[in-house]
Each structure stands twice: as structure tokens, then as C-alpha cells.
């Protein structure tokens, strides 16, 4: 399968490395997002020409949300799978764009919510099907980075709220505390879902170290713990993502996960702004 990767940031190089290690994947061309957007303004058939010339099967967009949207608008006739980075959007206008996408496009979009391509995480949530979950504590934070075009809550928050959206469509906000630190922002968020699951989240880029850990409590307060190393997540989950796009299947609909997680963060930001 022939891949087109768009975006030249650090994360795009992880995609390139993973594609090169997959026996069914071939990197046909790797473009700068900024250059591709500029070239498409000059030549309206720029992407159509690239796709035809290199016989592209799968496109990966690894860029900031605004750039991904600009490019995606030019790929609506593409019939292959499209991989997007999170967050999908950071504003209501961009949310409306994704909400109004035809279902035929949504069904072909894979979003790099890496938990949902992690074998260990999928095994964990499979175990939870037979249990009544009472509480969830999510620790997903780090020491930096500070990104120029994405706020920390939209950079780190989709991981946590992707997990939340898997277990509940709606929630009420009990408490939000945002603290600035030497490294960035610390977010302490308390929620209660419509199914009475109590959720606490620690996220942001303002902590002294990095942690990715989820503790699930059943109604007997027994703990089910998920924790995975960042190195393993970076490679194994991305490999599964590439594999899923090749086979055009994903166990969990990551488009919906990504859409709902960004919608939740908009809700969190509005609540914090108005409180």
C-alpha cells in the first residue's frame, strides 16, 4: 500500500519510521504541509496529480489542526483511508466542519488516539465489559512541550477525554482547577457521567515528569490499572494504526472518539472561562 505523508514535524518522522518497518506499507512521498497548501493554491489539481502520479492508497496528515483542515477540504474526493492527528479541532467553527462531513468520509478517517490502537489498552477495556465501573482516575501529563499553535489542554487533553468518551457520551463538570507552573499548565478536572461514573483527570504540560496511567475502580472498589511505557506506545500503537488503515478496519471508531474528545475540551474551556 502506497502512503503519502503530509507534515514534516517530529511526529511525522515516527510515521515514516513505522511505515518503513511494515511489510505491506511503502512510503511513496513525504511533503511539507505548508508547501503542499501553498502549491495547492497555485495548482487546484495539485493533490489529485500527486495521488494519481504515486498511486496513493493512504494519506497521513501530521500537522496542526488548521493545516489538517485546509488539506482535508481538498481531499474529499479521495477514496482511500486518511489518518489524522489529534486534536481534530480547537474551535466551534472547525467542529462544525467535522460534524458536517459526509459519513462516507468519516468512515475512512483514522485518528491517532494511540490508546485505542494499543493491544494492552484494548485488553484492559475488554476486561471491563464484565464489570460495573464506579470511578476512573486518569493521569496523562508531562513536562512540556509548549506548542506555538496548540494550547496544553488541547495537546494533552484529547488522550484523557478520548478515554472518557469511550465510557460516556455526556458528563457534568464538578470542578476545574487550572494552575500555571514553571513548565506550563496543570489541569485538575472532576466529572460525573450520565451513568454515574466519577472521573478525575490530571493533565497538561506543567508537571515535573511524564505519566500515562488509568485506574478503573469497580463497585467493590477493586482496581484495574492500565499503564504503558511511552516508547512502547509510540511504536506499537502506531504500527497497529498503520496496519488498521491498510486493512481498513479499526476495533473502535477513533473518528468519533476524536470528535467527542475535542467537543469535551471545548466544553471544559467554556466552563472554566465562565466560572
Image: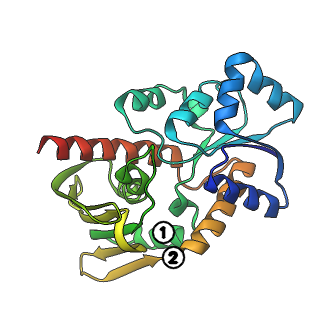
Q: Which residue is mark 1?
A: 126
Q: Give the camera-side residue of 72 and 115.
A: 72
Residue in the image at 52% along x and 27% along y: 101
Q: Quadrant of residue 230?
A: bottom right
Q: Left or right: where does residue 185 sit relative to residue 58?
A: left
Q: Left or right: where does residue 46 sit relative to residue 184?
A: right
Q: Give the camera-side residue of 99 and 140.
A: 140
Q: Is residue 71 visible?
A: yes
Q: Position of residue 212 (x, y in %)?
A: 43, 71
Q: Position of residue 59 (x, y in %)?
A: 71, 40
Neighbourhood count class around disc 2 (C-alpha, 10 Å): few under 14, some 14–19, many 20 upward: some
Q: Position of residue 192 (x, y in %)?
A: 20, 58
Distance in Å between CA atoms under marks 2 and 1: 16 Å
- What is the secondary structure assignment of the residue under circle 1? helix
Q: Which residue is mark 2?
A: 228
Q: Quadrant of residue 13?
A: bottom right
Amino acid at each position: 500500500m502506497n502512503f503519502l505523508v503530509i507534515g514534516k514535524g517530529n511526529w511525522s518522522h515516527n510515521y515514516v519510521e513505522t511505515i518503513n518497518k511494515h511489510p505491506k506499507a511503502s512510503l511513496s512521498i513525504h511533503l511539507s504541509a505548508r508547501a503542499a497548501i501553498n502549491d495547492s493554491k497555485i495548482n487546484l489539481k495539485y493533490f489529485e496529480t500527486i495521488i494519481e502520479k504515486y498511486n496513493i492508497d493512504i494519506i497521513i496528515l501530521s500537522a496542526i489542526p488548521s493545516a489538517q483542515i485546509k488539506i482535508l477540504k481538498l481531499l474529499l474526493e479521495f477514496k482511500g483511508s486518511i489518518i489524522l492527528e489529534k486534536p481534530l479541532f480547537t474551535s466551534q467553527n472547525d467542529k462544525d466542519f467535522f460534524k458536517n462531513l459526509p459519513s462516507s468520509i468519516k468512515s475512512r478517517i483514522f485518528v491517532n488516539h494511540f490508546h485505542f490502537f494499543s493491544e494492552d489498552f484494548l485488553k484492559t477495556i475488554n476486561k471491563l465489559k464484565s464489570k460495573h465501573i464506579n470511578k476512573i482516575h486518569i493521569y496523562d501529563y508531562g513536562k512540556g512541550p509548549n506548542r506555538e499553535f496548540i494550547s496544553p489542554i488541547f495537546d494533552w487533553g484529547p488522550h484523557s477525554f478520548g478515554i472518557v468518551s469511550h465510557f460516556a457520551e455526556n458528563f457534568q463538570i464538578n470542578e476545574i482547577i487550572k494552575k500555571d507552573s514553571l513548565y506550563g499548565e496543570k489541569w485538575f478536572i472532576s466529572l460525573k457521567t450520565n451513568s454515574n461514573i466519577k472521573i478525575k483527570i490530571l493533565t497538561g504540560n506543567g508537571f515535573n515528569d511524564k505519566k500515562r496511567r488509568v485506574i478503573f475502580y469497580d463497585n467493590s472498589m477493586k482496581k484495574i490499572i492500565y499503564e504503558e511505557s511511552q516508547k512502547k506506545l509510540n511504536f506499537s500503537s502506531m504500527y497497529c494504526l498503520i496496519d488498521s488503515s491498510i486493512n481498513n478496519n479499526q476495533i473502535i471508531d477513533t473518528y468519533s472518539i476524536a470528535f467527542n474528545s475535542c467537543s469535551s475540551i471545548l466544553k471544559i474551556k467554556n466552563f472554566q472561562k465562565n466560572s
